[in-house]
Image (cartoon, rainbow, N blue to C red):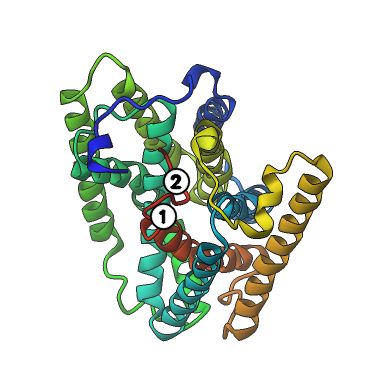
Amino acid sequence: MTESQIGTSRRLVDAADSVPLTVSRTALLALVVGFAAIRVADLRIPLRIQAGVYLLGMVAMNLPHGGYEHFENLRRRATTFQGRYVGAYLVGISLFAGLLFVAPVAGLALAVGVAVAKGGFGDVHAMDALYGTDHLRSRPQRWLAAAARGGAVMAVPMVFWPETFYAFSTIMVNIFEPGALAGVAGDLGTRRLLIGAGYGAVLVAHLGLGYRNASHTGSFRADAAETLLLVVYFAVVPVVIAVGLYFPLWYSARQVARTTAVDDAIDPEANAGLLDAFDSSDPKRVALASWGVLVVGSLATFGLAAGLWAVSPRPLGGAGLLVGLVAFWSIFISIIALPHVVVGAWLDRERGIWYVP
């Protein structure tokens, strides 16, 4: 987004008519109500059930969207760009994986940052397309909005589910170096207080500045309501389930809505390679290309996962099967998500995975 576009009313689609947007809001609200009732009834959900829900959400429901974002960014781009993009993406994966083997605690911190950045900046760009961001008048204010929304994904569970969050963090680090996190963990209560105070300051600043800059378009009201919904969702829903369902039900759904809103505004580049088949008027060619992308994307993703599993000293981090798989998949998703954000969004100045014209 250019400086001239900051703080403008940019509604490209009527939010009331956006099915994915409505689904994302309704799904999280329903989960909040459901899990609030479970807590009031003093019921406990076994961790293995939570792990199963996470894997259902992150593998079965969300994984296809990750490949879809790459495809959307590479579609209608020149073959030379596609080659540079794939090369830079693979370099990013290699560097992040290497960091985890050399310094797993630093790698874990970077993984948390990736989740915050992806959730936050993805949401801000979705707002650009769906109901506008005229209350975000500067680039620092957009970064603040991204920190408030993306921070809810990690900071809020750290405050409301500290034991579970720390337990899974330990397992994730143990995949590469058992016991490494224990030496730097510090006091859980103090860390919880500091994170809560820091995130609370970010949230208040975001809502306060947004309220001051609000106009008649209603963008601030929508932003504030959604941000607070995210905070309540991650506070009430157990963190393993909350993270596992957030990405397919919120992040992915909203990116589908954004893509639908801006698709007609994207002009194809010359020499688009094999992916130009998706803009063909021949339905057979489109169907064949779709099948090919799905197969290649699935093989590449699970091939990378298998490679990481094979070279990891303890792929399950010393945990049981389901819990260990949650930790392993979380690390793997972080590894492939970092270059997704850096290469696919921040380095691609012309368009990027969160493109809004």
Q: Is residue 275 above or below residue 18?
A: below
Residue drawn at point x = 41 percent, y = 86 percent: 102
Q: Residue furthest top?
A: 216
Mark 1 lies on a secondary structure that is: helix
Q: How many marks?
A: 2
Residue that lies at the very extreme toward the right in this rendered image: 284
In the figure, is residue 16 to the left or right of 213? right
Question: In terms of depth relative to the viewer, which is nearer, 338 or 284?
Answer: 284
Q: Is residue 192 left or right of residue 59?
A: left
| Residue for point 45% across, 65% down | 339
- The quadrant where residue 212 appears: top left
Q: In the image, what residue occupies the spot 58% across and 82% down?
A: 312
> Which residue is at the front of the view, 32 or 258?
258
- Measuring from the top left, give residue 314's x and y in whole percent: 58, 81
263 versus 115 height, above or below: above
x, y (%) of residue 231? 37, 37
Structural crowding at the residue carrying mark 1, measured as other residues with C-alpha within 10 Å and reported as few (<14), some (14–19) or many (≥20): many
- Quarter holding the N terminus is top left
- Residue 180 image offset from top left, x and y in percent: 39, 81
Please, what secondary structure does the residue beneath circle 2 have?
loop
**Which quadrant holds residue 139?**
top left
Query: 315 or 43, which is in the foreground?
Result: 315
Work out whether residue 41 or residue 144 is closer to the camera in this orientation and state it: 144
Which amino acid, mark 1? Answer: Ala
Circles 2 and 1 in contact, beta carbons < 8 Å: yes
Q: Amino acid at mark 2?
A: Trp
Q: Is residue 210 left or right of residue 150?
A: left
Q: Position of residue 161 (x, y in %)?
A: 41, 50
Question: What mark, if any, has residue 354 been given in the picture?
Answer: 2
Dot 1 corresponds to which residue?
A: 345
